[in-house]
Image (cartoon, rainbow, N blue to C red):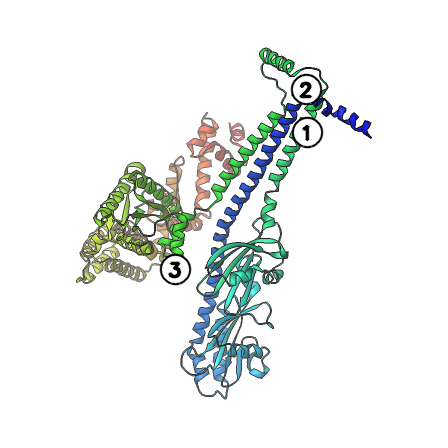
Amino acid sequence: MADWGKSWLRFSGIERLASPGKYLHRLIWLGCISVCIPVMLAGMAYYQFSLNRMNSYLQAENGSSLNNLKDRAERVLQEIEQESLQLAKDPVIQAGLTGPEDPYGLQSFEMLKRIELAKNSNSFIDDIFLYEGEESRVLSNEYGASDISDYAYRDNIRQLLESGHPAQWVQFANRKGHLTFVRRLPLIGTKGPEGVLGFEIETAALSQFLETDTAVLTDGDDLMIVKLYDPFAIEQRPDADAEIEAAELKGLNRIRTAQKSSGYFAAEGEGGKPAQYWYVKNVFGRTYVSVIPEQYIARQLNWIRKMTASILAAVAGIGLFLAYLTSKRAYTPIDQLIRYSRSISRSGLDHKRNELDIIKESLDYLSAETGKLEAYMQNIEPTLREKFLGQLLGGDYARKETLIHDCGVYGIEAEYTNVALIVEAENMFTEKRFLPEEKGIVAFALANVMQEVLSNLSLDGYAIPYQGRGAALLQFKPDVAQETSLSRTLEYASAIAQAFRDVLDFEVTVGIGRFYSHIADVPVSFKEAETALHYRIFRDSEQVLYIEDVEHVKKMTQFGYPRELEASIVEALDQEDIPAAVRYFRSFADVLQQSHSVVYTYQSYHILLSAMIVSMERQGASSADMMEHNLFGQLRTKTTAKEIRAWFEETLFPLYAWLTRKDRETSGESAIHTVCSYIRDNCGSDLSLVRCAEIIGVSPSYLSRLFKKKLGKNFLEYVAECKIAEAKRLLKETDRSVSEVAAAVGYSERNFIRIFQRYAASTPGSYRSQHR
């Protein structure tokens, strides 16, 4: 046995390492060990780092997911509660409870009709029952009118009468799969309860509406909605099992007794395995919970442990292999160094990689993967501060304590003096050719420039895109005088307007609210900034509107509606005298400008539009055509005097003349002929439906419908056919290249070849060779 051990030591080279002169072998083993330890530590550290980053990501995602779950659930539950209250207040229901006896059942029939209407108004309602205490009668969609003794769920009603709760959500043991909202009747008065009104919904339908694997639980007055969350979709459970598994979670008891309205903790989850709990409570006694098993997180990070083990195995193997080879050689370490030096001097570095190179490449790979993971996390991580500011401006914080806590989380001072600003771009969709659905892009550009100006002026504040506009919150220290704060704010607003004018060629208007000393008053300042922007209808030449400056001139309007000018405008339009109508309209607008009342002015313009619509109907215009143009919707989008005047004079007056013209069919054909000629003559230009509609003075949607009706094809198909027809002519009659022909008809070469093949059934080159 001893001889076998010595033979193995000699074979492996370990015995030679004990030789005093063989320092190289010891260095190899020491190097292997020295490298393995850092790699192991780096792998463990990286694993822990990735685990922490994953937990942070899950916390952020769960907060957003819980808010979405809460919003959807509250919308359904509050709608059920509201419908229950409306039905309880229904005069027929109240009369049935407090009125005289109903020997012929007519009143019961009316009450059943009300119950049926309430049930059909909401798809989540499975059944509605009403118990009349004095007559011991139950009315329901499922059983109709029956005595309480014959009602299948009479024990449930007795249980509700004994509970003493005026309104609550409950789950009855004999009504599995149902959630019931009950309300004791009557709603007011000192007389004892005479009835119970119950709305039953199927928990399966509610869970399916909310999210997969969602369970609805009740405990006394409390309602708990639990999401058994699997963020990586590793497993899927049947919907029927979600409620059973959620009821067995031990962490829910801790949430029920928690004093905080929201929180996060780790506890025992499904099957006794560790899990992470996130929860949010609201003022209505409802709790929303998300549960994530920790095993799902660990599975996503197993590759790090496997990679670390592979690297360690590779390093150890290479070290053993090199130790074995060097033990067979008879060279001293100094001789090895000399030979290696000579090889470098002759032919450069040796191309054979040793174990140190492999470890270095592995560490470089880990570093690169760390950078990729960090970049990925930064890209998918939601901008929580931006979301918080959006909720703050919208007034979504009902509790001041929660607001103060979130201010501390996102680094926003709660005791500073605050003022809100709104920046809105003017004429973006008419002059700059932006589409209405691109409001988000415009708002993003506004917020970027506003944040840059904030940095340039060294102001404390934040700028975000909000509701299609740019919004900013400026903060000043409490010891700063209000005059100084106002001057700095006006300076910032003027700098924003100048920056957009010089850099992006945008015209913007800035609305400024009042200054408030507490963060909870920011929504008030934001609403005041919106009010200040409304005064653009009088001050469309001013780019900065401060609420104090625009409201101090507000006074009671002593002007009457200019009825005579309205009649003159309509009469001129009936005679198709648009220039006269424009003159009367400008006098009409000048009268409104003198009122200094936003409400009065907007209402007057709407009254004028109503009068024009009535006149168009008298002239024989089609109601369907007028509804197609959505005239009141267009007027609501105009916010300045310039926009309103331009819309009336350039859009509405020509449309009035066109809709009331007697030869509309001939006019439609003439309009199509004009547009078709324009398209054929401008094949190489950027042809848009909006531009063509402007040429003939109609709306884009109407022109699109007219194209389909007259030509049997839509606008884009006709434009493509004209461009391809022009391309065919150029291919047959000229020697231009395919790319030049594509540019001549307004296409890139790649799109041109694809579209040409679709309409001509051949490539441009093949077409040219066939027709020349």
Q: In the image, residue 568 lies at what x, y percent?
A: 20, 58
Tell me if mark 3 has few (under 14), some (14-19) or many (20+) residues whose alpha carbon lies within 10 angstroms of its own: few
Above or below, 125 relative to 51: below
For residue 229, above or below residue 721: below
What residue does disc 2 label? 22
In this rendering, position of residue 734 left or right of residue 296: left
Which residue type does callout 1 highlight? Gly
Quarter of the picture holding the N terminus: top right
- The x, y position of residue 9, in whole percent, is 75, 26
- Give the residue number, with chain letter if any, for mark 3: 399
* Image depth: mark 2 or mark 3 in front: 2
Of marks 1 and 3, the one in the foreground: 1
Circle nearer the N terminus (2, 3): 2
Residue 350: which quarter of the image?
top right
* Residue drawn at 23 percent across, 50 percent down: 482
Secondary structure under the numbered disc 3 in the rendered image: loop
Mark number for residue 317? Answer: 1
Q: What's the CA distance linking mark 1 and mark 3? A: 63 Å
Answer above or below: position of 294 versus 353.
below
Check disc 3 and give the amino acid type: Arg
State the SS at label 2: loop
Foreground: disc 1 or disc 2: 2
Q: Residue at x 73, y 24 (%)?
A: 15
Task: Compare residues 513 and 114 and report the one nearer the observer.
Answer: 513
Residue 479 placement (x, y as % from top left): 25, 48
| C-alpha separation, residue under disc 1 versus residue under disc 2 | 20 Å
